[in-house]
Every structure is written in C-alpha cells, then in structure tokens.
Amino acid sequence: MGFYRCEISFLYHALMPDSLNHLPVHPLWQSPLTIPGGTRQSPINIQWRDSVYDPFLKPLKISYDPTTCLHIWNNGYSFLVEFDDSTDRSIIDGGPLENQYRLKQFHFHWGAMNDWGSEHTVDCKFYPAELHLVHWNAVLYPTFEEAVMEGNGLAVIGVFLKLGACHEGLQTLVDALPAVKHKDTVIEFDVFDPSCLIPSCPDYWTYAGSLTTPPLTESVTWIIKKQPIEVDENQLEAFRMLLFTSDGEEEKRMVDNFRPLQPLMNRTVRSSFQSRHLLNAEVQPKDHAEQMRP
C-alpha cells in the first residue's frame, strides 16, 4: 500500500521520530520552527488504539458548488485550488463543528517516493500523499485572515491518497498541472467539484491542531477521513513534475513538501466510529469464555 513503517519516539521539541531522521526534510523545516507555548501543533501520528470513540460526533455534511472554483496557483510549496468564499455556496457543517465553514482552497502534500508523503500518519504508517481542504468560520469571523488567528477559525478535511486505480475526478486536475509547473504561475480552473475527492465512507478522526505551514497558528479543527482514495502512479508523478522554483531559476522538483510530525502532548483524538481494536478486545473474552465452557 506504499506505507513506511516507523517507531514513534519523540524527543523534546522533536519534529520527527528518531527512525525518520533519514527522511528528506523540506528546507522550511530544517531549522526547528516552534510556537511559543504551542500545545496543539500539526500534523500528528494518529494511534488507532488510543483514539476515543465519541458517539455524539455527527456525520459531516458537505455541500460544494462547482462554479465557485476559481483557479490553480503554484505558490512554491504546493499547488492551491482556490474558491470564491464570499458567500455560503461551498460549505461544510456537522461533524465536530458548531458552525458552518466556507471552503477557501484545497492543496496536497506528497513525497518524492510512494513510501512517504502524507503529513499525518496512522499507527505510524505514511501514505504517498494527503489532501487538505481548508475551510473558515464565516459565522464568527468577517474574513479568512481573522479566522486564521482564532482557535475555532478553521476546519480542514484531510484525505489520504494511496496507490491504486486511476482517480477519474482527480485526473481533471492533473491534466491542468503542466500549466502551473513553475512557482507563482496561476491559471483559471472553473467548475470543479472537490467532493469527488472525498471518500464515501463517513468515518473520521478529529482533533484540535494547527496549520502545517507558516504561520502555524493553532486555529484548526482537523477532520481526518479514515478511508483513503486511490490514485495511480502517473497521477502522483504529475504532482512530482511541478517545481518549487520560478521560470528561469535552477529547477527544483516539488517533492517532500510535508511538515514533520509534532508531539500529541495532552490532546485527545476522537473518532466517529468504534475502533476495531476495541471491538476485538470486547469480543475476545466472550469467545474465550465459550471455549472454556464444559
């Protein structure tokens, strides 16, 4: 499945487990960036066994208007697909959210190889890439910029990408990427529905975290979908053909644009579904008792 196994062993202020120190690190993270007093930084490793099932978590409701899609922008770290967020035409609500949130943009993080690339990990397993759909709380805050600075200002849906079949919905986007190969290039990209990139399984994890790029503000309610979507090798290679650099500069391939893992600290990761580990533990004693019965 293209996962890279690791052992979690955080040092003080460690951004990576010791066994991942050999992984490539983007220059942005080569000097430790810390937030004074920061206690909810992202991304994290999600321990399936340690996540807490919350029966009060509601299903996440997603309503995107494809006509709010505006353009694709290579910002020199990833490519952003940006949306018109002046009205409530592309929104999410429900799930762990108390308010309605507007879609601002989505982007991806990926590795140079299929063994790593996602920002979050599950039981210490990486996926080749991860999608982030960024939304802001327009009920409480007048602008995205103000929402970024507030604890409940943003909601980001995270979706893992795994190697498999070609994703037809993603291909529309992939076909447009050569036009934004270089940093600071922008093209129009209208009538795209990003809900095609969200898996049908409703299960998710949620926790209080931060942006994974500067300013790293602790303003994000993370909603990490349990089920990944499948993409094929050619689609991942199309991501890797993009460049961190502007036209005319020495070319540097856009790969390994993920932030290293951050310590969980005192946070709880909640799940909208019951853990298979927990269910197995509940079933096992019953089975054992039946085996012991004369």
Image: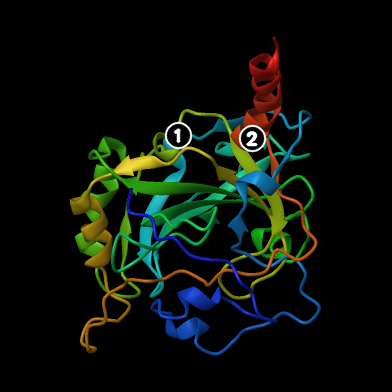
| Pick the front one: 274 or 88 | 274
| Residue under the image location 48 percent in, 75 percent down | 19
Q: CA distance from mark 1 to mark 2?
A: 19 Å
Q: Say if 268 sits above or below 52 in the image.
A: below
Residue 195 image-quadrant placement: top left
| Pick the front one: 38 or 287 | 287
Mark 1: amino acid: Pro
The number of callouts visible is: 2
Residue labelled with disc 2: 275
| Residue under the image location 69 percent in, 58 percent down | 143
Circle nearer the N terminus (1, 2) = 1
Is residue 45 at all visible to an observer of this figure? yes
Q: Residues within 10 Å of mark 1 (few under 14, many from 20)?
A: some
- 144 to the left or right of 57: left
Q: Say if 85 sits above or below 148 in the image.
A: above
User: Of circles 1 and 2, which is in front?
Assistant: 2
Across and down, in percent, residue 117 comes to 39, 63
Mark 2: amino acid: Ser
User: Residue 199 bears which disc, if any?
Assistant: 1
User: Residue 124 bears which disc, if any?
Assistant: none
